[in-house]
Image (spheres, grey):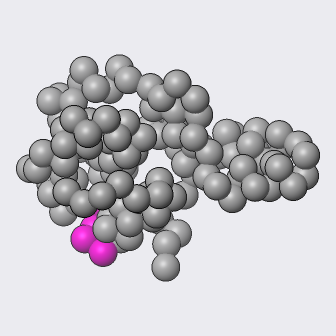
Amino acid sequence: MEERMDFEIFKSNICHDVKRKGDLFFIKNILNSEYIIELFKRKWYPECLYVLAMVDYLSKENNIPLCNIYDELRNSKLEELIYPRGVMLMSYLEKSNKPKKQMLKEAIPEFLKYGIVEAEIRNVY
């Protein structure tokens, strides 16, 4: 495993991976690897939970039962919500929590469950 990268870049790489490989291959690849466990062992909790959320979300989207080997990890949640950097910047520039509140309304439940505010995983170029 490589050095830790910026979380926004990590998320983008995961979304591109899903787009490139397709939902089913991505799920299969992650579940047949130790990737989530390795991220957890490194204490890279946002990355670990992001990948788990992606697997959970794609599984739901494709009517695939959740793999129960991560059930214990599914009880985890980050201490603070992680918003996309663009939303944080808009909130700062507007001196308002309105962008963050709007993003929360649009958040994908499988990500929000772990404390990650994510609304779009498919719109990558």
One can see residue 49 in this view: no
Q: Which residues are magenta?
A: 20-24
Q: Is residue 58 above or below residue 78?
A: below
The one nearer the camera, 44 or 91, is: 44
User: How far from the left and from the top, in percent, is residue 49?
Assistant: 37, 38
Position of the N terminus by quadrant: bottom left
Q: Is residue 23 left or right of residue 46?
A: left
Quarter of the rendering containing residue 80: top right
Q: Residue furthest left?
A: 32
Q: Residue furthest bottom?
A: 125
User: How far from the left and from the top, in percent, is residue 14?
Assistant: 36, 61
The one nearer the camera, 64 or 50, is: 50
Q: Is residue 29 left or right of residue 58?
A: left
Residue at point 24% right, 24% down?
71
Q: Is residue 7 above or below residue 38?
A: below
User: Does the magenta run of residues contain 111?
Assistant: no
Q: Is residue 80 above or below residue 15?
A: above
Characterize the magenta stretch by its predominant secondary structure: helix
